[in-house]
Amino acid sequence: MPELPEVETVCNGLRSQIIGTIIEQATVNRRDLRQPIPSDFEKRVGEQKITAIRRRAKYVLIELANGDVVIVHLGMSGSLILYDKSAYVPRKHDHVLLEINDGRILALYDPRRFGLMTVAGAEELDNLKIFADLGGEPLDDKIDADYLLKVLKNAKTAIKIAIMDQVKLVGVGNIYAAESLFRSRINPEKPANTLTKSEARLLIKNIKQILLEAIELGGSTLRDYVRSSGDKGDFQNNFNVYGREGLPCKICDTPIASIRQGGRSTFFCPKCQA
DNA sequence: CGGCGGTCCTGTCAGC
DNA sequence: TGCTGACAGGACCGCC
């Protein structure tokens, strides 16, 4: 569920709360997520100080004093929530609990178990299968229209599918792909390799803009996404097309259309994005 | 290699 | 009030 802005929001929340604290104990209630939680996870993570929190693509990275990094992906339905230990009530889908020495618990909750949690040495991160093929970070200054054109050059697939491909560009998922294409007035079905230079300029500019606006508002809360504090995000109130099938386009009043692409819903304005 | 569809899993909601 | 099917912020795998 969470895309870049939601993951960034989770990281920002954790950073302000748990840097410098120590994980007293890790408890794994279920190991069978998208990939199994390694059997030495508890031992490696226990009694370690948290030194930094970073994001790479849609992954949360929790750096530990011993050089290890806890890697978390929230999949479609995951969240990382901080509770006061005294107020914590176990939930069915709390798969991992990290007890912190400030009296709190960091819980990984993920009903669908499409997420993952693991631990690896900082120096081996880039060699991990899950990180080896990731594309560029959209908020990186180096990622520009030329980069976009380069990765789209041989992609005959629809532009909407292409910008959600984490090998080409990371962080953009179903919501922000649709919103970015709307703001750029690009039809989501346009073949990716037919993007002009000016379209690429516009699209990458709008992807960056929209991601930053969403981060500013704490991400988007549709169903169950919440920040680590338990607060909801606010960007969903700014959607122009996502989830607005049949409602009037905010620019031209034409009803927003919904189609399926790659098994996912795509929302767009048939007139603005002709 | 690119592209597409199916699959993983649980919860929720619309419609009968 | 059930039941059933469709759908949900993602990504991997196997097939053409």
Image (cartoon, coloured by chain):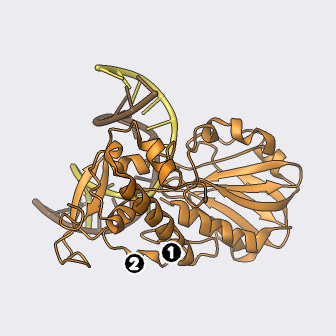
Chain colours: A orange, B brown, C yellow
- Which of label 2 and label 1 is nearer to you? 1
- Seen from the viewer's position, the closer of residues A123 and A83 is A123
The residue lying at 16 percent from left, 73 percent from top is A254
Q: CA distance from mark 2 to mark 1?
A: 9 Å
Q: Tell me, yes or no, whether the two marked residues, 2 and 1, touch with CB atoms within 8 Å.
A: yes
User: Residue A107 placed where, x, y %?
Assistant: 67, 62
Q: Secondary structure at mark 1?
A: helix
For mark 2, does the 10 Å Cα neighbourhood hold few (<14), some (14 to 19), or many (20 or more) residues?
some
Q: Earlier in the sequence, mark 2 or mark 1?
A: 1
Residue on which the image places disc 2: A238
For mark 1, does the 10 Å Cα neighbourhood hold few (<14), some (14 to 19), or many (20 or more) residues?
some
- Seen from the viewer's position, the closer of residues A119 and A137 is A137
Can see residue A260? yes
User: Residue A231 placed where, x, y %?
Assistant: 57, 78
The residue lying at 83 percent from left, 73 percent from top is A102
Numbered tag placed on residue A213 in the rendering: 1
Q: Chain of mark 1?
A: A
Q: Is residue A50 above or below residue A218?
A: above
Q: Is residue A123 above or below residue A208?
A: above
User: Which amino acid type is marked by label 2?
Assistant: Asn
In the rendered view, does A143 fall on the left or right side of A103? left
User: Residue A248 placed where, x, y %?
Assistant: 20, 77
